[in-house]
Image: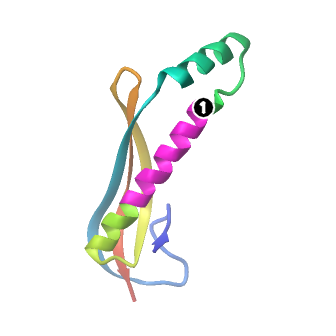
Amino acid sequence: MITSTTDKIPGKNISEVLGIARGSTVRARNIGRDIFAGLKNIVGGEIEEYTKLQADAREQALQRMVRDAERLGADAVVNIRLTTSMVMQGCSEILAYGTAVKLE
């Protein structure tokens, strides 16, 4: 599956637009990460536990988007975007979406 944040794939022609492909995940912090993050907040610096949590969530949302595109019969997903929203305190959703297309 070809994925791109641009609206075109260089060297390829889009023959059909199949619709929106989407994938999401909802992740929550946990007490272990919160303790380490609280300590890091005192001394400053990157909170690596949250960085990894968000990176894993983005990857899962993208994988789910690709599976949705495959379900639609797509060869590629173009114009991919990622967004996040807070669902509740300490819990957020990562959404990946793009346009599923067939290529010539």
| Nearest to the observer: residue 46 or residue 98 | 46
Residue 93 appears at what percent x and percent y?
A: 37, 38
Image height of 18 relative to 53, above or below: below
Residue 32: image quadrant is top right
Label 1 sits on a secondary structure element that is helix
Image height of 87 relative to 13, above or below: above
The magenta segment:
49-64
Kindly identify which residue carries mark 1. 49
Residue 86 appears at what percent x and percent y?
A: 36, 29
Image height of 26 relative to 81, above or below: above
Task: Using residue 69 as the reference point, say whether residue 42 is left or right of it.
Answer: right
Hey, which residue is sitting farthest bottom in the picture? 104
Task: Using residue 56 as the reference point, say whether residue 103 is left or right of it.
Answer: left
Main SS category, magenta section: helix
Residue 41: image quadrant is top right
Image height of 8 relative to 58, above or below: below
- At x 48%, y 84%, the residue is 12
- At x 71%, y 17%, the residue is 44
| Nearest to the observer: residue 30 or residue 89 | 30
Magenta residue check for 56: yes
Image quarter in which the N terminus is found: bottom left
- At x 33%, y 68%, the residue is 69
Image quarter in which the C terminus is found: bottom left
Magenta residue check for 57: yes
Task: Using residue 51 as the reference point, say whether residue 26 is left or right of it.
Answer: left
| Nearest to the observer: residue 84 or residue 104 | 84
Hey, which residue is sitting farthest top in the picture? 42
Query: Callout 1: 10 Å neighbours few (<14), some, many (20+)?
Result: some
Query: Type of residue at label 1?
Result: Glu
Numbered-mark total: 1
- At x 49%, y 20%, the residue is 31
Residue 9 appears at what percent x and percent y?
A: 50, 75
